[in-house]
Image: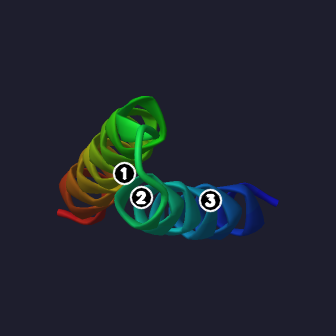
Amino acid sequence: MVRILVLVLLVVAIVLGIIGVAVEGMLCLLSIGVLLLIADVGYLAVRSAARRHRTR
């Protein structure tokens, strides 16, 4: 379930970024897309580090 949510958030971030770049005056969408992408990648990094720490 969490994997699906993460993938959906990645797709939404990419789509918002593309719309923000393509449509003039939609810089706020680009900003939201970039922030969402950074948050999602950060979540994946923390989750990956926690998983590696548990297996040792």
The label shown at residue 12 is 3
Judge the density around disc 1: few (<14), some (14-19), many (≥20) Cα neighbours within 10 Å. many
Amino acid type at mark 3 = Val
Residue that numbered label 2 is attached to? 17
For the N terminus, the image quarter is: bottom right
48 in relation to 33, above or below: below
Amino acid type at mark 1 = Leu
Residue 14 in the image: x percent, y percent? 47, 67
Between 47 and 56, the residue placed more toward the observer is 47
Residue that numbered label 1 is attached to? 37
Between 48 and 38, the residue placed more toward the observer is 38
Secondary structure under badge 1?
A: helix
Residue 7 in the image: x percent, y percent? 62, 70
Secondary structure under badge 2?
A: helix
Q: Residue sitting at 24 percent across and 53 percent down?
A: 45
Label 3 or label 2, whichever comes before in sequence order = 3
